Amino acid sequence: MATIPVMGVVAIVVFAILRLTPGDPAAIIAGDAATTEQLHQIRIQMGLDKPLYVQFILWAGQIVRGDLGISLISGVPVAQMIADRIGPTLALSTTIIVFSILVAVPLGVIAAWRQGTLLDRSTSAFSVLGFSMPVFVFGYLLILLFSIELRWLPVQGYRPPSEGFWPFLSRLILPTLALGTAYIALITRITRTSVLEVMGEDYIRTARAKGLKENAVLIHHALRNASVPIVTIIGVGITHLIGGVVVTESVFNLPGLGRLVVEAVLARDYPVIQGLILLFSFAYILINLLVDVLYTVLDPRIRY
Amino acid sequence: MTRATEPLDSADLAHGGGELLGEDESSRLSSIAELLRTLTSAPVLIALGALAVVALIALLAPFLGTTDPLAIAPGERLRRMSSAHRLGTDAFGRDVYSRVLYGARISLLVGMAVALASVAVGLVIGLLAGYFRLLDSIIMRVMDGLMAIPGILLAIALVTVSGASLRTVVIAITVPEIPRVVRLVRSVVLALRVEPYVEAAIALGTPVPSLLLRHIVPNTVAPLIVQGTFIFASAMLTESAMSFLGVGLPPEIPSWGNIMAEGRTYFQLMPGLILYAGLLLALTVLSVNMLGDALRDALDPRMARKL
């Protein structure tokens, strides 16, 4: 239930961004050649003659019905533009999330298990480095190495999965590495600390004392009890991920929602900007709601 | 703590803070020793050294053999390294070495400005939210809403609306950073409100402003220094990412992000146009993050265990 006011605040902020825009939205739509008559007409049509709170309610009503408005530049409904461009973004974020969890969680557990060893310390060093490396710098380094010098992978671009699995995957490998590194750094770090924190608990000693294999102790006892903060950071990290997707898509020329944001901003296409911010915020809220639900599964003591 | 149960007059209270610290003198000394020990470990010294170099580059840019970073020379486009242009020239014939050095100024300036502004604003809002229960729920809902919007998108949208300049970019990057500071300050206030010395001060009728300033704010300093350091690093990253996308600082400002943005077209031909500025940025952010980690370990042992 707490998500409704959050969504409301997001809507107000996004609405305010459009209304704070210097210049008359009607004038932007009408173009330079419009007469005062036509401007007046458009204002009434858009509801701009009504008080601000009425405008907000009308606008929010449209959003709730899934109507995100129409692009000022192309005249295409924003929802349609999003549907056309969401493919690469979904593909990229899914591969990053899956790849990062598969790498980061085992890495964090091993680092905690071998605390203080060279492996642990290099893992920690890597996670600070991964968090400090700008996505675009790392992305260009990867392109330079794997695409230009070694010629193993295509430089940039995107192919939908319908054109074959390898053409699709090969173009996602470098973007996933570029952006995934920061995400891996984040998850590894939290996994390591959370596992370290439970490793001193009595039940770990008990599990070892009853002769369980170290694997079973680590996975079923340590990781299981350390899972809540790990899942939390995966959810919180989604905001970093979304911000990173915008940059990564530009570096690797993936025609996804991130590119669309930049295109819309450069063209001052406000309805598209609004729609995308709403969509990304909604995704963030939804994922964190999912994380909240996961808590109760991972830790039955948590009740809402 | 014993004093809190005895009646105190305001004169006593004026010295109260000092006396309380007096009781903890030994632990204070040991925590200062701890701070010094953490801050003189090898990785931190390297990070501090790297930061000092970048800061010196920023300060002394005009004296390091640079030329005007904005001077365009159409006849000298995309030159390789030479004695005249140590790192070659860009697509407008501008000296890359000079631009990269002057870029340090912009990055550090943006990072510092955002860190100071978001900590200052976040501190005030956080104090209000933590102390006045009525404001709390409203403020925190707004902060939750702001946190739900991906920071870089909010910053980009704010710059689009207000027009690109150094000032608007700093404000735009500051706004998304504020909620985290507010949350931090609020949690400190909530924890302190139930401390006996704070309750005693409230019972004595200490005016709210002096209560907050004397008893609450000093306790937020250490966590805010740590948080501010991390904001410093992330603001530099955000600024360069925005400028890189062409939606940040105006293109004529020689920031590292802008230098990289201009280098994109010629990347295959001259990777240096992106890499010199990029690696310097990565080095600076890495040093600041390492410093932040060390400060957190030293100032806030509880958090150090957490992360």
Image (spheres, coloured by chain):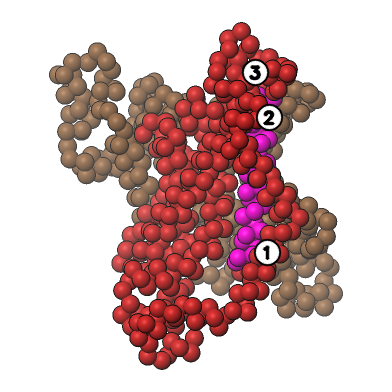
Chain colours: A brown, B red
Give the quarter of the figure containing the N terminus of chain A: bottom left
Helix, strand or loop under label 1: helix
Q: From this view, report whether residue A69 is shown above or below residue B200.
A: above
Say which amino acid is labelled 1. Leu
Which region shows up in magenta?
B272-300
Element at label 3: loop
Does the CB distance between marks 3 and 2 fall below 8 Å? no
| Chain holding disc 1 | B
* Name of the residue lying farthest toward the front: B63
Residue for badge 1: B36
The three-letter code of the residue at mark 3 reads Thr
- Frontmost residue, B180 versus A191: B180
Residue B275 is labelled as 2
Confirm whether circles 3 and 1 share one chain.
yes
B149 sits to left or right of A70: right
Residue topped by disc 3: B89
At a point 31% along the width and 41% down the height, the residue shown is: A16
